[in-house]
Image (tube, rainbow, N blue to C red):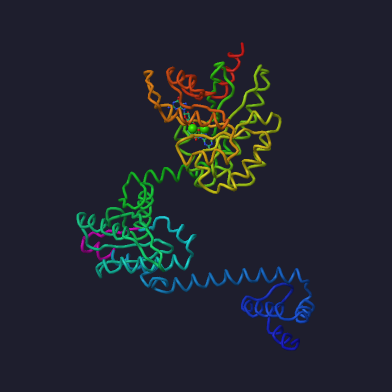
């Protein structure tokens, strides 16, 4: 065996832990065989190449990775050369661009308009994840089988990749277009049968018109993509036309996203504080920290204008870390006031932050120099919808540090007792929408909030009501056994200086 091995080894361009690209495959096969079959071969190989078993292992892994990405590269090159999408046989991105350019020149000459539809299947990733890629591929083929026969031969049908398709309807007016759009949407709504699985899928479609929405292939595709996102936003299973306002809004979001990158460094965020009042004493026991963004161009932005964006683009991790360190700083300055009561600050934490294990260390750092009980973490119920085990574990560890955990917006989401008993929750915050239901008159009608408070009391959880705006709401909540209030009735969120002054005034 040695001899054969030696001969093969000679053919390979091996120098000090590296192998020429063209020999990857042979080398990998050779190593694999030697290691599988024969200890002697293995020793021989390691000896000749002057590597340890560990080094050989690493080398093998590295080369394997390289050869895999090499394969991917050449596949991409191959795809670019081929005119057709290898999976479905319809046009691919490259030929679409060609065909579009041709169509644009003729339409310009003949002064006709055409429509370009950008389709993206809804929740296709879930299907791929749960039923596998092969299954996903079959479904994509089915899509083509179902849609293609409905198109005219002068239309274009292309797959851009993944679950994105483009349909170009030539020579079309608006009335005909809406009929066809409805038809395509409902084509998807009929159930799908693939490999014995019956599925419901749907598609979101963005629509642009030539020449109104763009003069070039790339512009039309870009704008159709924007319109498609709008359709997703509107709840999927819909089509949406591109408009200039939509374009401006997206441009605004892109601008915000770019600015967000610098916002922390430029100290543009600030925390405001909304006092939390104890029901029995009517005294302030702490505050909720609410973030604001002092944007240099757009002015003072509230969380609903940027938090989602921050979550989508990953900035929320750094922003959330800043919020916690600010909370720590402010708690320390409140402690320096030497008030008679210990004050806490509650911080809102988004699901994204709980998905990063580093969050634990971030919380730990936020506890330096304060009592852990002075920090409260507010999480929303939706946190629990995803990845409950990971979040659960992290929250338990954080609770062990002595930090209190509060469930925000209670009653609006996935809620329910099951979560409450499973999760390390110290208090629940009843959502404003339930507080709004409290009747003005003293009618005895039972409302949902009664049940929520009773339930929380049974489970020994502290109850906070948020969005309390009127005295009759406070009275009602107090009667039912709610422990704390927050809302405009007592104070709006105020900046740090005003909050400190309020605390000092109260302690006089
Ligand atoms: P939330 O945690 O439910 O915060 C309560 C929101 O209700 C705040 O809005 C507050 O200003 C408002 N509010 C309080 N009392 C009343 C009232 O009596 N009437 C009315 N109409 N509104 C009241 P805000 O400051 O715009 O914050 C909105 C949301 O943004 C918060 O909802 C929270 O989910 C999120 N948020 C705020 N700061 C942060 C943060 O630092 N990190 C993260 N991840 N989210 C944050
Ligand atoms: Ca909150
Ligand atoms: Ca809330």
Image vertical order of residue 126 relative to residue 404, above or below: below
Residue 291 visible:
no
Image vertical order of residue 384 relative to residue 75, above or below: above
For the point 55% across and 72% down, which residue is it?
A: 71
Q: If the image is split into quadrants, where does the N terminus sit?
A: bottom right
Q: If the image is split into quadrants, where does the C terminus sit?
A: top right
Residue 256 visible:
yes
Image vertical order of residue 394 relative to residue 142, above or below: above
Q: Quadrant of residue 66?
A: bottom right
* Residue 267 included in the magenta stretch of the image: no
Q: Quadrant of residue 147?
A: bottom left
Can you give x and y, in whole percent of width and height, for residue 90 in the image?
A: 36, 70
Q: Which residues are magenta?
A: 104-118
Horizontal side of residue 175 vs 255, given as left or right: left
Q: Quadrant of residue 270?
A: top right
Can you give x and y, in whole percent of width and height, for residue 423 in the image?
A: 58, 40
Horizontal side of residue 414 vs 12, given as left or right: left
């Amino acid at each position: 065996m040695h001899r054969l091995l030696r001969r093969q080894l000679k053919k390979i361009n091996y120098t000090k832990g590296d192998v020429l690209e063209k020999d990857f495959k042979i080398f990998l096969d050779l190593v694999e065989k030697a290691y599988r079959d024969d200890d002697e071969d293995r020793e021989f190989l390691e000896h000749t190449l002057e590597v340890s078993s560990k080094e050989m292992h690493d080398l093998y892994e590295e080369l394997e990775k390289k050869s895999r990405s090499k394969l991917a590269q050449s596949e991409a090159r191959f795809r670019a050369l081929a005119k057709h999408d290898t999976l479905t046989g319809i046009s691919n991105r490259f030929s679409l661009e060609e065909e579009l350019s041709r169509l644009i020149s003729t339409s310009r000459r003949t002064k006709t308009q055409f429509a370009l539809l950008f389709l993206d299947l809804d929740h296709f990733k879930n299907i791929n994840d749960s039923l596998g890629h092969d299954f996903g591929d079959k479904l994509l083929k089915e899509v083509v089988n179902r849609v293609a026969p409905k198109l005219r031969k002068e239309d274009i049908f292309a797959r851009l990749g993944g679950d994105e398709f483009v349909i170009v309807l030539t020579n079309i007016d608006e009335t005909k277009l809406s009929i066809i759009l409805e038809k395509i949407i409902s084509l998807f709504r009929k159930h799908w049968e693939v490999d014995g699985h019956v599925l419901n899928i749907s598609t979101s479609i963005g629509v642009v018109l030539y020449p109104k929405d763009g003069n070039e292939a790339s512009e039309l595709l870009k704008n159709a993509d924007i319109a498609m996102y709008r359709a997703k936003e509107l709840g999927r299973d819909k089509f949406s036309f591109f408009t200039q306002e939509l374009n401006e809004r997206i441009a605004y979001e892109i601008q915000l996203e770019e600015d967000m990158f610098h916002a922390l460094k430029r100290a543009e965020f600030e925390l405001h504080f909304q006092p939390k009042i104890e029901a029995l004493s009517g005294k302030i026991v702490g505050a909720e920290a609410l973030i604001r963004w002092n944007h240099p161009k757009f002015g003072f932005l509230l969380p609903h204008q940027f938090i989602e964006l921050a979550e989508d683009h990953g900035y929320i991790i750094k922003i959330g870390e800043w919020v916690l360190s600010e909370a720590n700083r402010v708690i320390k300055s409140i402690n320096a006031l030497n008030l008679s009561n210990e004050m806490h600050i509650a911080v809102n934490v988004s699901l994204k932050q709980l998905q990063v294990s580093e969050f634990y260390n971030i919380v730990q750092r936020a506890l330096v120099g304060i009592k852990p009980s002075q920090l409260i973490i507010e999480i929303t119920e939706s946190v629990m919808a995803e990845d409950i085990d990971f979040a659960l574990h992290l929250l338990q560890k954080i609770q062990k540090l002595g930090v209190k955990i509060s469930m925000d917006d209670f009653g609006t989401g996935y809620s329910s007792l099951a979560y409450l008993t499973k999760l390390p929750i110290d208090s629940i915050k009843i959502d404003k929408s339930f507080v709004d239901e409290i009747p003005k008159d003293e009618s005895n009608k039972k409302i949902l909030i009664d049940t929520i408070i009773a339930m929380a009391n049974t489970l020994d959880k502290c109850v906070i009501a948020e969005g309390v705006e009127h005295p009759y709401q406070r009275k009602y909540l107090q009667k039912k056994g709610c422990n704390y209030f927050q809302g405009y009735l007592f104070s709006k969120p105020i900046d740090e200086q005003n909050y400190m002054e309020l605390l000092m005034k109260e302690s006089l």
